[in-house]
Amino acid sequence: MDIHILPLTKSDIPEAVECIQTVFADDPFFRYMFDQSSYNIARNAASLSAHFLHGLSINAPIYVAKVTSLKKSGSDEESRIIGICWWHLPLSTTSRTPFTVRAQDCLLSLRQLLANIRYAGRGGLRLHRYRQWKELQARMHAKIWTNTRGYYFCNVIAVRSEMRGRGVGRRLVEAVTQRADAEGMPCYLESSKGMPNLLIYEKLGFELVSEIECVDGKDICTLYCMIRPPVKHESEN
Ligand SMILES: CC(C)(COP(=O)(O)OP(=O)(O)OC[C@H]1O[C@@H](n2cnc3c(N)ncnc32)[C@H](O)[C@@H]1OP(=O)(O)O)[C@@H](O)C(=O)NCCC(=O)NCCS
């Protein structure tokens, strides 16, 4: 069985969406953000697809892990996405966002608006919780980020359960951390799970720096904020 780490392509999007939805079905952050009684999986897929199209159009680093195997007929190969790692590019706080990115941001908003109309809403997203998280995140980032060059933000990492513990997550993360190291840039992620994820991310070079606690009534969701400082490799000395 060969596993390849490849940049996401447009034709990968439906399977990448399904992979994320499967892996995150029991995720604490997903459960906190979405009202399970009104959750609409098709609306969620439309939103994820719109974000992937946005990411592709601005060259965001989004990688998929694909397993290729021979078809039962033995003649052709088939491939399956078994993991995905989706990053946001660093945003400098001192320079203006490029026009192309702003244009793609507008297109993303338009796609989301059309999805709202098509699916008659946000598919169960609890907007007040989403806004609360964004506000807490912005406050916390203002404290921890003094580097004006920004950071690579690992927005989503997901490996199908049957493929975990075989180095796929490491290979997906390293596709971007190696680039970040070469550029001298830090990386950042928010883990919605404590253990074992904190241990896994520590092995990938991340350190816990803070926590975001979202509270709404009796519901609480803790996000573990981790930074990976750039590593200087021997060949760069
Ligand atoms: C987190 C996740 C992406 C890791 O992917 P993975 O393919 O299982 O990770 P790897 O096999 O590459 O392991 C990476 C490192 O963590 C270690 N590790 C893996 N599972 C571990 C566990 N349960 N406990 C401790 N360490 C573990 C590995 O040994 C490896 O370190 P090493 O290379 O130094 O030996 C995967 O578990 C996952 O998708 N989990 C569910 C979704 C999720 O929680 N996503 C993130 C939400 S923030």
Image (tube, rainbow, N blue to C red):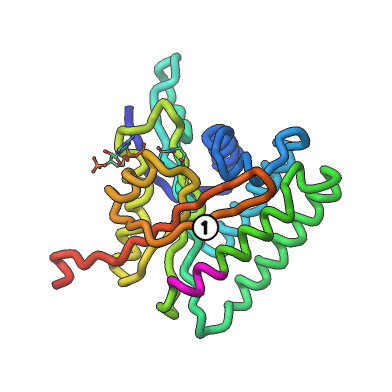
Residue displayed at 31% across by 72% down: 184
Residue displayed at 71% across by 63% down: 107
Magenta-colored segment: predominant secondary structure = helix
Q: Would you say residue 113 is visible in this rendering?
A: yes
Q: Nearer the viewer, residue 205 or 29?
A: 29
The magenta stretch spans which residues?
A: 139-144
**140 magenta-colored:** yes
Q: Nearer the viewer, residue 62 or 225?
A: 225
**229 magenta-colored:** no
Q: Would you say residue 15 is visible in this rendering?
A: no
Q: Which residue is mark 1?
A: 212
Residue 140, given in percent of the width and then of the height, sits at 51, 67
Q: Which quarter of the picture shows residue 12?
A: top right
Q: Nearer the viewer, residue 87 or 130?
A: 130
Image quarter for ligand 1? top left
Q: Which quarter of the picture shows residue 39?
A: top right
